[in-house]
Structure formats: structure tokens, C-alpha cells
Amino acid sequence: MNKQENHLKVLAIPKSASLISRETGELLSSNPYLDLLYQEVESLGAEVDGYSLRNRGMLGKRYDVIHIHWPDDLFNRHSLIQASLLAIASVLAITLLKLRGAKLIWTAHDVQEFEVRQPWLRRPMWFWFLRQVDGVITLTEAGHTAIYAKYPRLKKVKSWIIPHGLYSTSYENTIDSSEARTHLNLAPENKVILFFGNVRPYKNVPELIYAFRKIEDCSYRLIIAGRPIDQQIKEEISALAADDNRIMLQLDFIQPNDVQVYLNASDILVLPFREILNSGSTHLAISFNKPVLVPKIGSLEEIAEEFGSDLVMTYDGELNAEILTDALEQACSSPECYPQIPDYLQWSSIGANTISAYRELTKL
């Protein structure tokens, strides 16, 4: 089919996960997943608009597909008034667009929200949202099973498994380990454990610090690099690390050009999630061919089987010093350990499969 035939019009909620400060223009947070996905979708001839209630023209358009990723973004705000107004406006906007013929497809990145700010809104909004879903995309077989278990009514709608791609083209990767360590004042003999990403309660960073502090070897280093979700968790992390000079804290958003510094300076990335279904940080580690240690929960065991235990290591139960040291000793840094990335994980394939899902849902 010619890519211009049956031109698809898509409303993406959201189209980009990048957050830019209105005051300074500074990039405050970024996840390339959406940018990579919709670049491919647009290259195949679809027209993709980003959802914004400030864009009045959006409500005057007719869309074939509404593609939503994180439904709680439609109502989960700190301010009660703001959350209520956003929820009402979102319900009205999506209802209107569906009445004009749009089909709603949900990429279910997880089965739950991790920071519920307005619990009284959660139940009615999810009740409403699940009845709007015409199709659901999950990223793994494990995700497919988990979503059906959590929301049985979704068994009635169309579904597809379209995996999470890698970030190999999203970040510079031009410096080696030696240069990266020099930048962070790390010695060649240091054994470096890294946590990378936004610091949020479910990511369980305190448990990582507790486990690390029980390692007596003075050559070990732990780097916590990422912006805390709030001041309380920032203060908790700072207090736990205060009297151990082997722990390095960079509690701020890591600019894209600096991502390579932290990944290439470390021996292993550790992500001690308390609960998770899918993990973009795990895919980031794989993109840098960096061994990563994760708990055996959600889809992480499936990802470990896909990429092999040299690159993705898993553990059961609570993280401890022995698990950390064993993983670091087993971590393989040889290029021979790096897997060949299968075609279905290329963004061109992910984009094509997403377009196919749109067309199957809309019959275009």
C-alpha cells in the first residue's frame, strides 16, 4: 500500500515526553521513546498531532486514532482544582473526538500509577477510560498477561504486542570508559555501580544504598544520577549517603549529552525496582551495551531471556551486598557478550507494526 493512501490522522497523548521549563527554556526531563516512535509513524505517512487542551484547533479536527500512553496524565495533578478541571476537559475532548469516529488505542506501559495524587478521582476516571479503549498495545508477553489480569474487560478489544525499542540513536556514545571516569573523578581500579533515572519511591533507591553500604571494599563506588520526584525523597537519599564518601550523588536531571558519561563510567547499572512492568532504563543500559541488574518481576525476566544473562541479570527477593558484588564480578564488558539486535526491535519495524495496528483498528 502506498504510504499516502488512506492518510491516517493520529492524536497522540502525549506526542513527546520531553518537559521544557517555560521560564528558562531548560530541558527538565526527557524520554526519547515517544519521539522515536512517532518519527517512524510519520515517516510512513501518518499525520500525528500532540494532545493539548490549549490547542482549540484540535477539537475542530477529525482523527482516526487517539493513541494514549499514560492515562493518569489526564487527571493526576498535585492541585485538586487543576486535577478536576483537567479531568473534565479531557473527558469532554476525548468523548467529542470519539463521537466523530476516532478509535482509542492504549499502549499499556504499566498496570498502575506509582504516584496517585488525587485518589478520589482515580476510580471514576479509570472506570470511564477503560470503557473508551478500542485497542490495547503491550510491550511484552508478560505485559499482555498482566494487563488482562488487571483489566479483564480489555479481553474484549483488539490487542497487539509491539516491543519497546532501544535508544542507540538517541544519545551520543563517543567517549570510552577511561575518559568518562576522568570526567567523574573515578579511578581505573574503582568498581562502579550506577543507578540512573528519575528517583521515585517505586524505584527503591534506599534499598540499593543500604545494600551498597554493607560492602566493605573501599574500591567500590555507587553513583545515584537522576532527579528526585520530590524534596522528601531527595532529603532521604542525601541523608542515607551522607557519611559514606564512596557514594556519589548527582540528584538532578542528567542532560542528554551527559548520559554517555554516566553509562560509560560504570561497570554495571542497578535498578532495584520494588514494582514495575516495563523499564525504559533497562533498554537504555542495553543500548549502551551496559550490564544491568534488575529484580525478577514484571517483564524484566522476559527481557533477560531475550538479551541473555551476560547483559541483563536478575535477582529474587531483596537486594543485598552479596547480590551486588556477585553481579559486578559476573558482568561482562567484552563485545562478544553484546547481542545482535533483532529486526523486530528496530524502530522502523516498531513504527510499521504500530501503523498496522492503527489500520486494523480503523479498517483503513
Image (cartoon, helix red, strand yellow):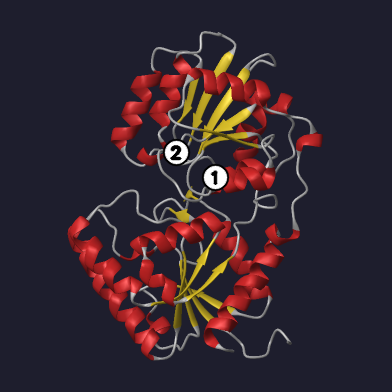
Amino acid of disc 1: Leu
* Image coordinates for residue 328, horizontal then vertical, percent: 62, 23
Amino acid of disc 2: Phe
Tell me what residue is drawn at x 23 percent, y 63 percent. 123
| Residue where numbered disc 1 is placed | 300
Q: What element carries label 1?
A: helix
* Image coordinates for residue 229, horizontal then vertical, percent: 36, 42
The one nearer the camera, 56 or 154, is 154
Residue 273 numbered mark, or none = 2
* Image coordinates for residue 278, horizontal then vertical, percent: 50, 51
The one nearer the camera, 5 or 85, is 5
Image position of 223 (left or right of 283):
left
| Quadrant that contains the N terminus | bottom right
Residue pushed farthest right?
336
* Disc on the earlier residue, 1 or 2: 2
Q: Is residue 122 visible?
A: yes
| Quadrant that contains the C terminus | bottom right
- In the image, residue 49 sits, relative to residue 236, either above or below, namely below
